[in-house]
């Protein structure tokens, strides 16, 4: 097995008091103890937006706080590096892990993949780098109508000349250049009033060069009353959908693409079964149950009408939500919701333990939401510190974690090491006129770091 990497970055508002390594504490320990009590030593697990923003809040508002951030990947930044689409670098300034399983027949067929793995693949997540999605089909179908679904659709349809300038991995670009995909269906169980994507992402799809939206005006015909009553952001989004649906298709003048591409939204359809090719070698379609809504607002429930519809497609991407995994059996976890049970970030039943980000509130919201929510967790921790309810005593921090990791065969990657990887990525990018070339092979990364 390849050695695992752990990142550890340490920040302190002030130079930190150092404990000497070794079993015996040096003389003067009592004195050191009293200093350490005043300098809370905080461990943050995970270097996504939640980890960084929580650390930022702590360092900013506690003059003596010391923060160690631990990351299980060889490189930091969580979904900012491995989730946010490469053509969206402006939001990159953002431990959800599992994708929800559909639990329907044929899910294991080649050609059926999770949007999460696909996103990991085009972003160079080491565990997805061998995904090799087969884009040798003309129709792809995405299950789910959130921003991740639109990200995936956009990456599939964007002319590769435009992707070339981003930090998408070279491997993904190569595969996308040979893609035959011309049509992408984005399928939701419920209706237009319940879509989970936001207007900015929708507008980008509508304006995508060389691609035509395929929206059925009938899907929007009975919504006028509901639109009037919707909240302002939802109203704007729905109005844009209706306007687009009513517009007759027009060839885009700026398009140099000879075979026009298209994308469309399909509503009130719930996946029942993946349809295999005659010899069972791959997916060639999907059976969808036609649904109707009970209720009309954002909480409306979809119920089956009994009708079915088969849609031919050579690629199915399920994008029905990300879900965090339990970090450790000793940390409380709600497997159904995929969150750590907490009150304002304080983990229930585990004093001294806090959570923030997607593992705190579930996989919703953008980086700014995670930022706000992480500041609140930081605030709760500092309040508890001030109130004296946190377990007292000096924390040894990295000095005891390091030997533990080494014992488990983990080669730690330090902040200095990361700077080395970062410099290499930037240098490789410069050589080909891109902001950076992402390193994707863990072995190659370890080689760059050199022997320890
Ligand atoms: C495909 C996709 C596209 C997105 N696009 C956008 C966008 O365009 N704009 C936007 O604002 N938001 C976007 N988001 C949302 C944004 O990514 C999240 O809001 C944000 O990343 C959540 O932060 P987090 O720190 O909770 O989780 P994460 O970013 O997942 O960070 C968790 C970190 O913890 C690490 N970790 C997990 N378990 C352990 C462990 N046991 N030990 C050590 N480390 C561990 C993980 O490796 C990871 O680095 C997107 C999300 C996805 C999935
Ligand atoms: C299944 O059929 C396809 C052509 O339809 C062929 O390319 C493929 O090799 C076949 N696979 C198996 C396992 O027989
Ligand atoms: C974050 O908090 C600020 C200040 O309270 C607020 O203005 C902003 O709308 C919040 N952003 C999100 C995405 O919640």
Image (cartoon, grey):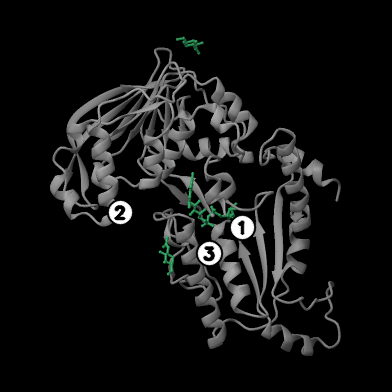
Mark 3 / mark 1, whichever is N-terminal: 1
Q: Is mark 1 within 8 Å of ligand 1?
A: yes
**Percent position of residue 71, x then y:** 65, 56
The one nearer the camera, 139 or 102, is 139
Which secondary structure, mark 1?
Answer: loop
- Badge 1 density bin: few <14, some 14–19, many ≥20, Cα 10 Å: many
Residue located at (59% from left, 62% from top): 52
**Percent position of residue 375, x then y:** 51, 70
Is residue 119 placed above or below 324 in the rendered structure? above
- As drawn, the label of residue 401 is none
- As drawn, the label of residue 233 is 2
- As drawn, the label of residue 331 is 3
Where, by quadrant of the figure, is residue 189 drawn?
top left
Q: Are marks 2 and 3 in contact (CB under 8 Å)?
A: no
- Residue 421 visible from this viewpoint: yes
Mark 1 / mark 2, whichever is N-terminal: 1
Is residue 60 placed above or below 95 in the rendered structure? below
- Residue 329 visible from this viewpoint: no
**Percent position of residue 390, x then y:** 57, 81
**Percent position of residue 145, x then y:** 35, 41
The one nearer the camera, 424 or 449, is 424
Q: Residue furthest front?
A: 253
Residue located at (47% from left, 66% from top): 372
Which secondary structure, mark 3?
Answer: loop
Which secondary structure, mark 2?
Answer: helix
- Residue annotated with mark 1: 47
Q: Are marks 3 and 1 in contact (CB under 8 Å)?
A: no
Viewer-nearest of labels 1 and 2?
Answer: 2
- Badge 3 density bin: few <14, some 14–19, many ≥20, Cα 10 Å: some
Q: CA distance from mark 1 to mark 2?
A: 31 Å
Where, by quadrant of the figure, is residue 192 drawn?
top left
- Is residue 418 rendered to the left or right of residue 297? right
């Amino acid at each position: 097995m390849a050695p695992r990497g752990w990142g550890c970055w340490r920040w302190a508002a002030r130079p930190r008091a150092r404990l000497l390594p070794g079993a015996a504490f040096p003389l003067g320990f009592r004195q050191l103890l009293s200093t350490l009590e005043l300098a809370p030593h905080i461990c943050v697990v995970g270097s996504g937006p939640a980890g960084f923003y929580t650390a930022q809040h702590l360092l900013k508002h506690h003059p003596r706080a010391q923060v160690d951030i631990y990351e299980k990947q060889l490189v930091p930044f969580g979904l900012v590096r491995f989730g946010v689409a490469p053509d969206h670098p402006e939001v990159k300034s953002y431990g959800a892990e599992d994708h929800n399983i559909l639990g329907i027949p044929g899910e294991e067929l080649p050609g059926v993949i999770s949007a999460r793995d696909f996103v990991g693949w085009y972003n160079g997540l080491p565990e997805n780098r061998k995904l090799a999605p087969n884009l040798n089909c003309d129709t792809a179908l995405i299950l789910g109508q959130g921003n991740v679904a639109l990200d995936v659709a956009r990456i599939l349809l964007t002319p590769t000349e435009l992707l070339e300038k981003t930090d998408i991995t070279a491997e993904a670009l190569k595969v996308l250049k040979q893609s035959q995909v011309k049509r992408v269906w984005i399928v939701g169980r419920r209706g237009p009033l319940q879509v989970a994507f936001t207007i900015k992402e929708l507008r980008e799809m509508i304006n995508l060069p060389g691609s035509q939206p395929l929206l059925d005006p009938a899907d929007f015909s009975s919504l006028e009353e509901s639109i009037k009553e919707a909240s302002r952001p939802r109203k704007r989004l729905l109005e844009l959908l209706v306007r687009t649906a009513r517009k007759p298709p027009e060839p885009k003048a700026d398009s140099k693409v000879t075979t026009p591409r298209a994308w469309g939204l399909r509503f009130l359809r719930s996946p029942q079964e993946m349809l295999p090719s005659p010899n069972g070698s791959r997916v060639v379609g999907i059976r969808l149950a036609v649904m109707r809504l009970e209720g009309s607002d954002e909480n409306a429930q979809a119920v089956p009408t009994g009708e079915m519809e088969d849609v031919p497609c050579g690629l199915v991407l399920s994008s029905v939500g990300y879900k965090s995994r339990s970090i450790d059996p000793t940390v409380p976890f709600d497997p159904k919701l995929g969150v750590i049970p907490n009150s304002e970030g304080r983990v229930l039943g585990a004093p001294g333990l806090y959570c923030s980000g997607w593992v705190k509130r579930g996989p919703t919201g953008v980086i700014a939401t995670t930022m706000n929510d992480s500041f609140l967790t930081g605030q709760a921790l500092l309040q508890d510190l001030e109130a004296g309810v946190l377990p007292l005593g000096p924390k040894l921090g990295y000095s005891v974690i390091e030997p533990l990791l080494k014992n488990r065969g983990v080669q730690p990657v330090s902040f200095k090491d990361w700077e080395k990887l970062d410099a290499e990525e930037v240098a490789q990018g410069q050589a080909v006129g891109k902001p950076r070339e992402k390193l994707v092979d863990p072995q190659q990364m370890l080689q760059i770091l050199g022997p320890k």
